[in-house]
Amino acid sequence: MKTMTKAAGPLALCGVLFAFLALAAPAAARQVQPAATQLSAADVQRLEEAVYDANTEIARLRSHDPERANALQAKLNDLRDEVVYLKVKQRKEGASRADYGKLRDEIDDVRIEARTLIPAAKPAEPESRNEPVVKPARQGTTTRPNEIPAGTELDVRLEEALSSETAKVEDRFSATTIADLYNGDTVLVPSGSVLRGIVTSATNAGRLERTGKLTLAFDRVTVHGQAYPIHGTVTQALQSGGYRQDAKKIGTGAGVGAILGGILGGFRGAITGILIGGGGVIAATEGKDVILPAGTVLRVRLDSPIVVK
């Protein structure tokens, strides 16, 4: 009997160990998931940005169809709650990208429906068949002789191409003004002055993201070798048809003259396939990256005044 007990001891121990491993293996498998299936904080942020974009489209729809806008808003509110839940889940225990993809599709559906319900604006009649009219840049008002007021819009030409596929946050780029900017008879910013731009966010059109986005800002303009800090936001992107070398000054009197790039530059109209939202966010159509070729003209709104010495 003693011999049998001694022999059974190791066997019993092996049995217990085997049972422990059998129970532990599934738990370990659940904990070690491929990184590709894990939801990241950046993914959650993209969902929050998508909700913001959808909310913007609904706000635009509300002035045309309040009833449909309210229905979409209620649906978006539910989706926003799901994003909050997913954010908490991602922080505490992790969440799968499958949940992300389904939720992102539903948010996009709301945004697209709101956008398609907004009546299309009546296009301006072109001056000629090949050259659509581009509305003049907006000019601010000021009583100071050397001030460019907030609200003034400048048309600038990109010196290099930009793409949401390759751009990185904090990338610098340059653009040059197209025509002289006057205040009365005084040139405040001559044509060819250089603006420094910064990429403040970039999202490429991946399989899950689907929509490429770029956010551009301008923080400096150099006039006659003197750099001035600015805060400029992109409001429009235009296709360039080249500009005339004999461009004359625009604007007289006390106000700052607007740079009428649409007249001087022979623009072919706004670039198709992109949308520009608040804060200078440039979003491509579904499934594509934002591509701004070198020579693209960006309309830049000054969000703060500049005093040129």
Image (tube, rainbow, N blue to C red):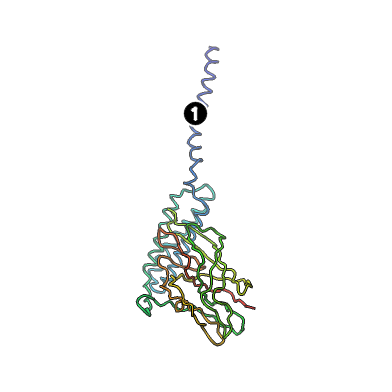
Q: Residue at x 48, y 40 (%)?
A: 30
Image location (x, y in percent) of residue 216: 52, 65
Number of numbered labels in the structure image: 1
Image location (x, y in percent) of residue 194: 57, 70
Query: Could you classify mark 1 by the number of other residues whose Cα lies within 10 Å: few (under 14), some (14-19), or many (20 or more)?
Result: few
> Which quadrant is the C terminus positioned in?
bottom right
Where is 272 relative to 21, above or below?
below
Seen in the image, is 122 located left or right of residue 202? left
Where is 295 relative to 42, above or below?
below
Q: Residue at x 45, y 66 (%)?
A: 55
> Among all residues in the image, which is located at the extreme front?
245
Nearest the eye: 136 or 13 = 136
Image location (x, y in percent) of residue 256: 55, 82
Q: Residue at x 54, y 23 (%)?
A: 13
Residue 308: quadrant of the picture: bottom right
> Among all residues in the image, which is located at the extreme left?
129
> Among all residues in the image, which is located at the extreme bottom?
253
Q: Which residue is mark 1?
A: 19
Which amino acid type is marked by label 1? Ala
Nearest the eye: 110 or 152 = 152
- Regarding mark 1 in the picture, which secondary structure is present there? helix
Image location (x, y in percent) of residue 33: 49, 42
Where is 96 relative to 147, above or below?
above
